[in-house]
Amino acid sequence: MSRPKRKSNVLEVARQRLAGLKKISPKPTFAAPLSEEAFEAEIEGFSEDQNAYNGEVAALDEKTNRLDARERLLDDFNQRILAGIRAQYGPDSNELELVGGVRRSDRKRPVRTKTLKTA
């Protein structure tokens, strides 16, 4: 399952505001830290950071998929090794226990209880 990409409603509102701001004639004057250029630079900076983040999320999704595939391969290998040891040494061998298997004699048999029928 892929991770969700980041979207920003604030960025969309800022882009619409900037487009409206550019259409105002004569250009408005703001206090010292505010200007059309600074606003546009902040929008572009945020947009670049968001695009970089979304690119890293996509790359991480790809790595996750590769890791999941390798994990399935390793799980298959684990099962095959255990089956090979069981075939070579037997299902009740010490070697089977050494590689993490459970010997047949160590398995607990299920106890069945009889149910009494009431008349």
Image (cartoon, helix red, strand yellow):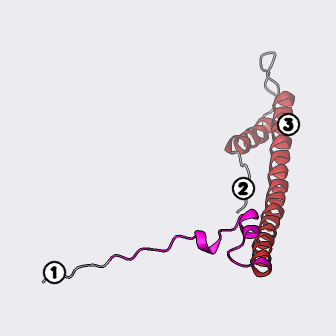
Q: Position of residue 67 (x, y in %)?
A: 81, 61
Tell me the distance, in whole angstroms, between the alpha carbons under discs 2 and 1.
Answer: 57 Å
Give the SS element for disc 3: helix
Disc 3 target residue: 45
Which label's residue is closer to the chain start, 2 or 1? 2
Q: Nearer the viewer, residue 3 or 104?
A: 104
Q: Residues within 10 Å of mark 3 (few under 14, many from 20)?
A: few
Asked if disc 2 and disc 1 are in contact, CB closer than 8 Å, the reply is: no
Disc 1 target residue: 118
Residue at 80 percent of width and 63 percent of height: 65
Q: In what quadrant of the picture does the N terminus appear?
A: bottom right
Q: In what quadrant of the picture does the C terminus appear?
A: bottom left
Q: Nearer the viewer, mark 1 or mark 3?
A: 1
Residue at 86 percent of width and 42 percent of height: 48
What kind of residue is marked 2?
Arg
Q: Residues within 10 Å of mark 2 (few under 14, many from 20)?
A: few
Q: Residue furthest top?
A: 32
Report the number of numbered marks. 3
Q: Nearer the viewer, mark 3 or mark 2?
A: 2
Disc 2 target residue: 3
Tell me the distance, in whole angstroms, between the alpha carbons under discs 3 and 2.
Answer: 23 Å
Range covered by the magenta-colored residues: 89-113
Q: Quadrant of residue 92?
A: bottom right
Q: Position of residue 35 (x, y in %)?
A: 82, 25
Q: Nearer the viewer, mark 2 or mark 1?
A: 1
Q: Is residue 25 above or below residue 71?
A: above
